[in-house]
Image: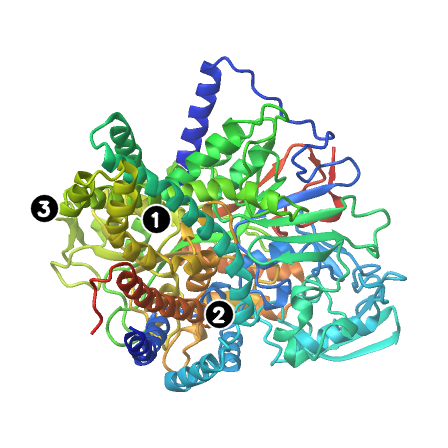
């Protein structure tokens, strides 16, 4: 709403200045130093200012529970052996090449991986970057007491590290680990400039990292800005092109856009406007770039009876236990309008959990928008139209006659696109005689624990709407979400199969995907899971969010990537 | 009066203790916790979160956690931020000067404008000046501060330009231009936030003083002063204002804690790194030590301001007797 207000204000301002016949004051040319002393872009150098809505807690990706850390840390401390480029492919960074069976970097049994560093690498403080730092990184991330929250998967499988010379690290795994490239794509730790692995949470390095990245921290003004300067020891000759980066913390979306309008900032994380509004407001100065993000929105169904004190899958849900009702709900949703109007500009189509990445599975919707079909399915399932436009049970599979077709739709609060989606879904369902009652909870309740009686964990819900995102290694999340052994109960409180979905095909496909090393086999296995999801409908996928970045037109080399953050590829940026 | 002051101060000890218990419980019973956002991250396993909770001592019984926190508070240590892994004392100390500057200057501007406006309006009620000020203050009171802030940005940052340089008239987004840290630059950055913050206060204080002054002007002693031929200015500023300003003192004293607590809306809109934002970020992220630190100090200051208001009242008005 505030954004609309800004647009209105700006329009008023434009009208006023037009009425006055006043000449639009020329924006100061980029090369001319403004008297105000603002950071001035210069060709082949200069400063880029990046707007972030909140301050990161630190610059250590592995401690990060919030996306904002990566947005900033990627410019400095997240330079690792490999990275994922904008096409989703792995490319070597500090490593000479990616180890594969073909080039001898990996043994035939996949258990030995040899990483070779580029020659003469240095940390930002001038100390040599050696294979011992790879060993140290493994020591830290395999330590269960490090306090690391993300990026630790697979490190416990590494049983030994040999460093025959400063450039070579030979890793031995206890079992083949398909994510062996991904695990080294988020940065290395310098042994000489950090601390004890078990004390990682308290390293001074976290807020002032000695790094191998293109930039290195120079000043951190709490709550206001983080400044980084060029790393003199960066491995790529002649890069980075810029002299410095300034991340400014500006919480108010309208003020962020205003700063982009005045050229005080060049990169803008997650603008609040739609792409059309943004491009119109900032014509000739900046534009909005979107890439598919990783957050995939779906409605989850509870297949087991809610509020029966039994979190297991034993008793079916009186309404949603019938597949035909789930099919009717899937057919009742007007996906095109949802994506093109209701969430215009910020979402794109998604039909299943695997909507992007190497595991992407292109599946059509078996139940596209079709009101007639939805009505017909509900009639067949024994739900007849009641006087108030809501159906009631008459010979339904599980529900007693006279039960109203009324379901609760739970979501989380304070996220506008979700609220708009919920309201739209309610209308869609109403049109076929299903009543959906929106019940939004604070984030912390929806995503709470079994012990906290979070509704999804204990199975006390009908429908749940939220978004989830995968990294390049999706196995642990999907196993947790779909495998029948992961239904949360008092004995198994951390399980993530909130649907209470039992599907033997899915179970075996997930087991295959988790044990195979062949990317094609894994992809096929995940696609099998996706197929079952669209068929058996424990959930209905709606859309994936696009990641939006605003960036100045005079900036060259800015490439937004699904797998990167706002500061990904900062070494390649320069002013035109 | 000294005895009264000492007694009031002693009373604050049990009050603060009770407040600390209530605050601690309130903060801890709010849904969620510092690791809630991690729970939503599909790449964080639940086992990792549990291990971290254990490591941070979040699973200990609440009385144990309260004891640990209170033990620190009594020795002047507010603990360590869960999110930032930094001492809370240090984080608060960093923000205090910024907040003092923003709120202090706004306060000063408010008093410098509100008192003359209030007095002049009361002196010639229903005059053109009074009507004009009534209109302005009415607007000032009605405009929500976030709307005013955005309006100021559009007018003074986007639309109006410096006629000599073509750059914006006043900056937004922080306390300093990048690479500069001189006082002049900071003052330049202070203009819009102070304007946004003081307009409402000016309206509120000047209206208050106006009605208080009009009441006083009908008192016998004012008529007496006029009758004995005192100069008009003496009547207004010496006799009337001194009495009319009494209720305002209470008001000002009660607003003083915001010098510490900050002004969340204005700080957010103008990206001013003050206490309001520190508090809000801590509340959102359930960063218990930071949240409790800020709230406890604010509570203590509110109590102190109340005592101060009572004492100042007696000092300004000898009729008030302390039992």
Residue A552 placed where, x, y %? 63, 35
Q: Is residue A419 visible?
A: yes
Q: Quadrant of the N terminus of chain B?
A: bottom left
Chain of residue at mark 2: A
Chain of residue at mark 3: A
Q: Secondary structure at mark 2?
A: helix
Q: Secondary structure at mark 1?
A: helix
Q: Nearer the viewer, residue B41 or B57?
A: B57
* CA distance for labels 1 and 2: 27 Å
Q: Which marked residue is nearer to the observer: mark 1 or mark 2?
A: 1
> Which residue is most to the top?
A21
Residue hosting label 2? A480
Residue hosting label 3? A387
Q: Is residue A150 above or below residue B115?
A: below
Residue hosting label 1? A419
Residue A537 placed where, x, y %? 38, 57
- Mark 1 surroundings within 10 Å by alpha-carbon count, few (fewer than 14), some (14 through 19), many (20 or more): some
Cβ atoms under marks 3 and 1 closer than 8 Å: no
């Amino acid at each position: 709403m505030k954004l609309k207000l800004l647009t209105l204000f700006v329009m008023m301002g434009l009208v006023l200045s037009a009425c006055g016949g006043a000449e639009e004051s020329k924006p100061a040319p980029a090369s001319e130093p403004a008297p105000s002393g603002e950071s001035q872009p210069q060709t082949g150098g200069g400063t880029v200012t990046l707007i972030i809505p909140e301050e990161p807690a630190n610059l250590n990706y592995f401690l990060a529970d919030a996306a904002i850390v990566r947005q900033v840390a990627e410019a400095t401390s997240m330079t690792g052996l490999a990275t994922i480029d904008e096409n989703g492919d792995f490319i070597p960074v500090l490593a000479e090449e990616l180890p594969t069976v073909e080039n001898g970097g990996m043994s035939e049994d996949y258990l030995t991986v040899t990483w070779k560093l580029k020659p003469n690498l240095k940390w930002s403080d001038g100390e040599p970057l050696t294979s011992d730092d790879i060993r140290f990184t493994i020591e830290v991330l395999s330590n269960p007491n490090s306090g690391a929250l993300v990026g630790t998967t697979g490190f416990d499988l590494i049983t030994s590290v040999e460093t025959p010379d400063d450039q070579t690290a030979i890793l031995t795994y206890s079992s083949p680990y398909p994510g062996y490239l991904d695990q080294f794509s988020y940065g290395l730790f310098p042994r000489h400039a950090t601390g004890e692995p078990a004390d990682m949470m308290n390293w001074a390095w976290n807020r002032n990292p000695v790094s191998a990245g293109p930039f290195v921290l120079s000043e951190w003004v709490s709550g206001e800005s983080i400044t980084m300067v060029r790393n003199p020891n960066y491995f790529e000759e002649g890069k980075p092109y810029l002299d410095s980066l300034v991340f400014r913390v500006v919480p108010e979306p309208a003020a962020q856009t205003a700063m982009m309008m005045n050229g005080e900032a060049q990169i803008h994380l997650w603008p609040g406007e739609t792409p059309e509004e943004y491009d119109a407001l900032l014509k000739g100065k900046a534009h909005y770039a979107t890439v598919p993000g990783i957050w995939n929105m779906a409605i989850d169904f509870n297949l087991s009876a809610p509020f029966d004190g039994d979190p297991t899958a034993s008793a079916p849900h009186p309404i949603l236990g019938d597949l035909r009702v789930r099919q009717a709900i899937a057919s009742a949703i007007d996906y095109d309008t949802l994506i093109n109007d209701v969430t215009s500009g910020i979402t794109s189509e998604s039909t299943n959990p695997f909507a992007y990445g190497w595991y992407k599975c292109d599946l059509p919707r078996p139940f596209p928008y079709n009101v007639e079909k939805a009505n017909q399915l509900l009639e067949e399932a024994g739900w007849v139209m009641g006087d108030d436009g809501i159906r009631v049970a008459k010979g339904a599979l599980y529900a007693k006659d006279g039960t109203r077709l009324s379901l609760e739709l739970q979501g989380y609060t304070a996220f506008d696109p979700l609220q708009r989606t919920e309201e739209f879904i309610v209308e869609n369902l109403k049109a076929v005689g299903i009543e959906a009652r929106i019940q939004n909870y604070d984030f912390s309740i929806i995503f709470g624990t079994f012990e906290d009686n979070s509704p999804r964990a204990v199975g006390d819900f009908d429908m749940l709407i939220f978004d989830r995102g995968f990294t390049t290694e999706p196995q642990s999340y999907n196993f947790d979400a779909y495998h029948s052994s992961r239904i949360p109960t008092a004995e198994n409180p951390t399980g993530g199969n909130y649907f209470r979905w039992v599907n033997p095909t899915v179970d075996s496909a997930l087991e295959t995907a988790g044990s195979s090393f062949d990317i094609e086999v894994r992809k096929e296995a995940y696609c099998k899971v996706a197929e079952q999801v669209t068929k058996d409908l424990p959930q209905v996928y709606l859309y994936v969010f696009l990641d939006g970045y605003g960036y100045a037109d005079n900036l060259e080399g800015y490439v937004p990537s699904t797998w990167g953050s706002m500061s990904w590829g900062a070494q390649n940026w320069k002013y035109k | 009066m000294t005895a009264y002051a000492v007694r009031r101060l002693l009373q604050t000890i049990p009050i603060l203790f009770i407040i600390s218990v209530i605050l601690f419980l309130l903060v801890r019973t709010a849904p969620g916790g510092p690791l809630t956002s991690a729970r939503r991250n599909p790449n964080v396993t639940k086992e990792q979160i549990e291990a971290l909770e254990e490591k941070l001592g979040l699973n200990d019984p609440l009385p144990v956690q309260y004891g640990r926190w209170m033990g620190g508070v009594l020795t002047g240590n507010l603990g360590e931020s869960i999110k930032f892994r930094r001492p809370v004392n240090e984080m608060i100390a960093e923000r205090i000067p910024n907040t003092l500057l923003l709120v202090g200057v706004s306060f000063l501007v408010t008093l410098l404008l509100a008192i003359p406006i209030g007095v002049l309006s009361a002196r010639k009620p229903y005059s053109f000046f009074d009507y004009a000020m009534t209109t302005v203050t009415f607007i000032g009171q009605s405009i929500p501060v976030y709307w005013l802030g955005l309006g100021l940005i559009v007018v003074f940052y986007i639309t109006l330009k410096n006629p000599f340089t073509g750059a914006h008239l006043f900056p937004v987004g922080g306390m300093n231009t990048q690479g500069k840290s001189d006082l002049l630059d900071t003052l330049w950055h202070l203009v819009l936030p102070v304007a946004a913050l003081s307009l409402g206060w000016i309206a509120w204080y000047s209206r208050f003083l106006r009605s208080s002054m009009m009441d006083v002007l009908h008192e016998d002693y004012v008529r007496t002063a006029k009758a004995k031929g005192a100069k008009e200015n003496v009547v207004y500023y010496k006799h009337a204002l001194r009495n009319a300003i009494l209720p305002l003192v209470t008001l000002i004293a009660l607003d003083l804690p915001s010098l510490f607590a900050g002004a969340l809306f204005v700080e957010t809109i103008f990206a001013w790194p003050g206490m309001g934002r520190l508090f809000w970020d801590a509340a959102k992220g359930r960063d218990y030590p930071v949240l409790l630190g800020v709230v406890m100090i604010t509570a203590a200051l509110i109590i102190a301001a109340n005592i101060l208001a009572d004492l100042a009242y007696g000092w300004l008005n000898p009729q008030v007797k302390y039992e």
